[in-house]
Image: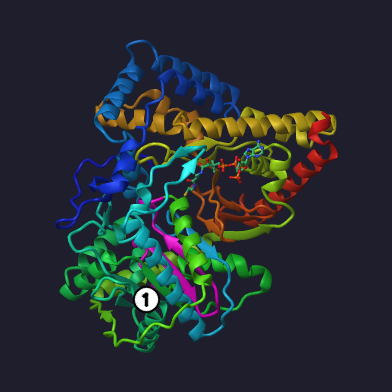
Amino acid sequence: MEDGQQKEKVKPPGFLKPFSLMKVSGRFKAHQDSLPRLPVPPLQQSLDHYLKALQPIVSEEEWAQTKQLVEEFQTSGGVGERLQKGLERRAKKSENWLSEWWLKTAYLQYRQPLVIHSSPGLMLPKQDFMDLQGQLRFAAKLIEGVLDFKAMIDNETLPVEYLGGKPLCMNQYYQILSSCRMPGPKQDTVVNFSKVKKPPLHITVVHNFQFFELDVYHSDGTPLTSDQIFVQLEKIWNSSLQTNKEPVGILTSNHRNSWAKAYNTLIKDKVNRESVRSIQQSIFTMCLDAPMPRVAKEEYLSHVAGQMLHGGGGPLNSGNRWFDKTLQFIVAEDGSCGLVYEHAAAEGPPIISLVDHVMEFTKKPESVRSPMVPLPMPRKLRFNIMPEIKKDIEKAKQNLGIMIQDLDIRLMVFHHFGKDFPKSQKLSPDAFIQVALQLAYYRIYGHACATYESASLRMYHLGRTDTIRSATMESLVFVKAMDDSSMLENQKIELLRRAVQAHRAYTDRAIRGEAFDRHLLGLKLQAIEDLVSMPDIFMDTSYAIAMHFNLSTSQVPAKTDCVMFFGPVVPDGYGVCYNPGAAHINFSVSAYNSCAETNAAHLARSLEKALLDMRALLQGHPWAKL
Ligand code: COA
């Protein structure tokens, strides 16, 4: 994901600017300008932290070898110092030394399909409707809610968020609506249409694989009310009843190189080009899904997660998506709903703020019935499916089918306690959960693994994320001690507290911009840019182990009772996401069926037991008495 540098410049279409280059103005600009710039950490500090982070996951021999390479790298006047100076120069010249690099290496040059591999899904609470009327009413209200949120973005009145008492960069909020990724042969682009001369006034609605352009503003600039949107959705529904349409949207689920090739063929046709352009420029997409096949009650949550993440495959709803679109809401006839979003534009938290706002909005009763003005029929977006494209669609269907078969995903509501319990023990809830994950993993595998947790860098202008490495020596000592019958309970409690505190301390460093992962990535990219040979520390076994994240995790907290999910980042790994409530925690765990060693349900059960055991340990010995 971080390899394969792209030298050629990919131009976005026409007059449009990639979002990172957009100029902004007004109140938003003033806030953005007031934020500090992301610092480049001192070289020695990052290398010391790197060596420390390796200890729980590599052998002693590997560690000794790496230590030597690190010493050579940081010798005075050596390559490390030169690259560090290069980075510092870059930091002086740019708004954020990391953000463009990160956008390219983590997203735009990443060639795996967006589906499962990159785009997170989100499941919303099941709505209590069971028919078409209910589906369209809810979808209409949801659309109205997004437009209500958009008004705050447009007039720059979104309240500034804070983390640890510090104001956060709000840039990602300005990227999630009216934007779309576009495939390229070696590198994609992501284009934001909200700051162009004539910003879009329409959304895309998909039903039975058929796309529609729905204008959501009146000519005087006021948004349609949900009653009016409902009428428009009914029209769309009634004119897309055929179920034998080619699922052209499924092309966007393919490997990026294959999709880029198919895209060029597709848009050679003028009608297709205009339809694609309309989808790309729309504010967001509303997918009106066919009902899912019925499944056993205990399978329901995991099944919906799959539905949101990938659409269920060619015969189901995957053709009811345009996966390049930054934001796609999904509402199915049976009351299940959620979204899938393209990750290049933003992390989960801004998406969640929007979701929290929209879900609150949907609960508001209709105050006045809006006048039923005659509204034009939404425009159907037509596609001419040439034989070559038909072949591409078939291939995309097959590939997606294989990917879906391979995905093992479990949603778990841990209902025994939520973040109130660790708080009552004066422990950080996030760190407590991460230590429980270490215990769950260790109990299955008997060793620790490289673990990734996203930390926000939004304290800094245009900040995205850095890595909290949850496998620490403190967590390893604790997980080993936990099941050691020769250890006293008091000692175990002490080790548990130390592990949690070590994690929290790592988090504090990471959000201050002092974690080492992005710094090392920067040094590596600087070496590529300077055309110097790749330093040995990046060619080392320990580095490969450190970058092989068997556990890829993220906390995405929400007021809404929901959870996000994503696929593992390595073939033998897990993707774990959680939303801790006060009294329960929603978890998602994913793995690949093709890996005999991983099993999502198994890890979920182990995690549940780890959390319960850790609570029992602490409750057996109230901390105040120690
Ligand atoms: N005693 C009592 N309470 C404590 C505590 C302690 N020792 N430590 C923390 N708490 C409280 C906090 O005050 C906070 O209270 P609140 O619920 O009133 O807000 C709560 O517990 C949660 O804190 P904590 O669990 O420590 O986590 P956090 O909210 O600081 O989040 C991260 C930690 C890493 C998730 C956060 O810093 C972050 O970076 N988030 C962004 C991640 C991201 O981008 N994810 C998406 C990727 S797509």
Image vertical order of residue 249 relative to residue 244, above or below: above
Q: Give the range drawn in magenta.
A: 319-346
Local SS, label 1: strand
In the image: residue 611, left or right of residue 271: right
Depth order, front residue of 484/202? 202
Q: Does the magenta stretch include residue 461?
A: no
The percent position of residue 38, horizontal first and vertical second, equals 37, 32
Quadrant for ligand 1? top right
State the quadrant of the C terminus.
top right
In the image: residue 558, left or right of residue 82: right
Residue identified by numbered label 1: 206
Image vertical order of residue 373 relative to residue 381, above or below: below
Mark 1 residue type: Val
- Residue at image position (55%, 37%) is 450
- Residue at image position (19%, 76%) is 271
The percent position of residue 383, horizontal first and vertical second, equals 25, 77
Residue that protrudes farthest toward the front in the picture: 368
Depth order, front residue of 173/29? 29
Can you see residue 56? yes
